[in-house]
Amino acid sequence: MMKYFQRLGKSLMLPVACLPVCGILMGLGYAICPNVMIGGEIEGTLPIIGFFMVKAGGALIDNMSWLFAIGVAVGMSDDSDGTAGLAGLVSWLMIVNLLSSGVVEVLTGAPANAAFGKIQNQFIGIIAGLIGATCYNKFKNTRLPDALAFFSGKRCVAIITAVVSILAAAVLFFVWPVVYGVLVAVGTSIVGLDAIGVGIYTFLNRLLIPFGLHHALNSVFWFDAAGINDLGTYWAGELLNGGGGSAGMYMAGFFPSMMFGLPAAAFAMIHCAKPEKKSEAASLLGAAALCAFICGVTEPFEFAFMFLAPALYVIYALLYGVVAAISVALGFRAGFSFSAGLTDAVFSSFLPAASNTFLLIPLGIGAAIVFYLVFRVAITTMNLKTPGREDDDENEMKIELANNDFTAMAEIILAGLGGKENVTSVDNCITRLRLEIKDYTMVDEKKIKSAGVSGVIRPSKTSVQVVIGPKVQFVADEFKKLM
């Protein structure tokens, strides 16, 4: 099961890699054209450029759920084929359209539950991706009668996916409103607990990020599901909201963690990475930290480790809750229209509901210190597999192949495995080919090693790992072509 979630975590890197540049575009766009955020006319060359940048970045961030559907489907497929990505998109389109508020109202003859207005979330995207990948893996080699031969093989995957997605939508029709309702009820129950309630809400908000279910909680605190409307009252300049507290109290606590705590946690991960992998970890986590600081887009960082080290993610969510509770208790109030990054912090600080905004600096420094120390200690003492700490042998990173004919190497390895009929799954990590086989007696290790590889590892009767080194991707690509 853990291996499955680790693979899911790696699959999510494909869509998440798109987000940092989009987040930075939006942050810079808001800085150039603040009227996109606070309202007003957009006139002049620079504001129009800023508006253009905001819309360009939002094109992907606002549609994260279908990026997840495609990315998870491709990543979880046996051979990372684009057909699986198409199947994931088919599943997502089927589910979100069948469960849209308009369709539900027609089906039931009554107003749709508010839950169906929030159906386009990452949780549904991940489900759709898993459906698409599963259907692809199961039916990509299906052979149909001659009369239906056109739909054989990979062409039948999308059709089967559509049928499975209809069934999934039928199940979600009953399940999703219950899940959404429970989350709204939990949110409503902690209203009025002041700073403690803010801390609980913020902890749950981060904890639910992997599934996109935090939107249900947000509807209670940021919008008008329970009469609070924290976001709306803050930007309208009202000093008090329906929850009895000051406007911005359910947003302010995110700023210290997103702008200072998250980057510090990213640097802790980089420092804990293996020496030969520090540059790779720094490129991923550094971009994620910059994205969070500028505009509060945190998914590139969170999805980089939440499935690899779930215990660390719970600690991360808990730190958010503690920092938020302390921030609100000290009277810090701020708000955002997009997220808790530098851009929103600057432009929201001039509004009437803002209070003690100078506290952001000391609170941020305190959050940075705590996040860094806690992450550093947790990663090292629990030996967590965060980016840059994967299990590949350190010596494998130093391997230099004498033979760079990757096609020939792939051919020899495949022959040593007993041919493509004996191989059921092909994957690779940073240094190894990871293969699943049918009959272990057909594996010829001497034949495989004659390709010039560094070694062969057999963890089980159905698993073979071929140690190639950093150039493994090139061999894997040729191997998949042969398959």
Image (cartoon, rainbow, N blue to C red):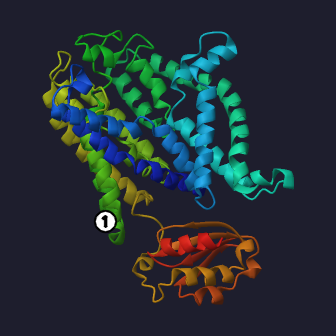
Taking 63 as reference, is 260 left or right? left
Does residue 343 lie above or below 237 as drawn? Answer: below
Residue 175 visible to the viewer: yes
Residue 181 visible to the viewer: no
Residue 187 drawn at (x, y percent): 46, 21
Residue 20 drawn at (x, y percent): 33, 47
Picture residue at 57% right of the left edge, 19% below the top = 101
Q: Which residue is mark 1?
A: 279
Does residue 404 lie above or below 48 as drawn? Answer: below
Number of dots carrying numbers: 1
Type of the residue with mark 1: Ser
Quarter residue 424 falls in: bottom right
Quarter residue 340 falls in: top left
Picture residue at 54% right of the left edge, 55% below the top = 6
Picture residue at 65% right of the left edge, 44% below the top = 131
Residue 70 drawn at (x, y percent): 54, 47
Q: Looking at the image, which is closer to me, 330 or 422?
A: 422
Q: Looking at the image, which is closer to me, 339 or 363?
A: 339
Q: Looking at the image, which is closer to me, 377 or 418?
A: 418
